[in-house]
Every structure is written in structure tokens, then in C-alpha cells.
Image (cartoon, rainbow, N blue to C red):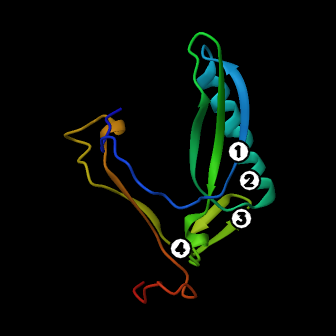
Amino acid sequence: MEIIDGPRVVAAPLRHCVGIRVVTPFRGMFAVRDQLMTELYSWAAERAVAYGHTFFRLHVVDMDGPMDVEDGMLRDWAHDQGLTLDRTVSPAGERFACRYEAYLTDPRTEPRKTRWHTELAIRLTDESPEASSID
């Protein structure tokens, strides 16, 4: 994994989230993380909870002892901004009027996906104040 930005100090606004917190040994911690993420996605889907980015937080780090970790989801940024994504929920999953990833890195010159720069774009509904009239 390549770190794009170096360390910096920033003031960030309060962001609400939901999560599952457990204590687990370092060995096997990432398998526990994956299980918790699956459980979290199921929980959100059952309740139709809109969410933004997911995260893995380390509350206590002890490589030789118990790790206190949390898998979580940030509340949906678009919802918090008063924006409505142009999407519907169906038994097959979420259907978007337009949602795409633009690959700013050429995969032919950089085959490692962990090094790609990607831009995500999602169309807003006409009711959103920022919605474009372009189809």
C-alpha cells in the first residue's frame, strides 16, 4: 500500500458512526475484522441504514497481547449534506441512475490496484440542491 498523503494535523468535524468493537489477539485480527465487517454490512442492509465509508479503528494496540479494535461505518456524507443520491433499493441491491469510478491511474502502466488513484461519481436526484440538469 502506498501512502498518498504524509502525516498532518487537521481539525475534523464530528462524524457520527456505528460500529462493532471487540478485543482479539493480534494473530488472526484481520480475519476477525473481515467477519465483523460482514456482520456490519448485514446489520445495515436489514435496517436500510445509509452509510458512507467503512473503517477499522484500533483503540488499543498490543502486538503481544489483546488488541481492542472496531469495525464501523460513517453516516452517509451525502445525507448529512442534504443531498439525495439518484438510486433505488431492489432485492438485487442498490440500483443507481449513474455511479462510476474513473481510474486516474492507467492500469496498463500500474497493474497494482492498491496504487491506483480513483474518482467516484454518483448522480444526485433532481430534488438535491446541487443536482445537475445534465443527463
Q: Looking at the picture, how far across and down is residue 44, in whole percent?
A: 74, 53
Residue shown at 34% from the left, 46% from the top: 8
What's under tag 2, amino acid-wise? Ala
Whether label 2 touches label 4, CB < 8 Å: no
Residue shown at 48% from the left, 74% from the top: 123
Mark 1 or 4 closer to N-term?
1
Query: Foreground: 3 or 86?
Result: 3
What whole-number distance in Å separates the C-alpha atoms at marks 1 and 4? 29 Å
Q: Looking at the picture, how far across and down is residue 51, in whole percent?
A: 63, 58
Q: Quadrant of the C terminus?
A: bottom left
Whether label 2 touches label 3, CB < 8 Å: no
Mark 2 or 3 closer to N-term?
2
Mark 1 or 2 closer to N-term?
1
Check the image and report above or below for 95 versus 36.
below
Residue 19 — which label? 1
Residue 90 — which label? 3
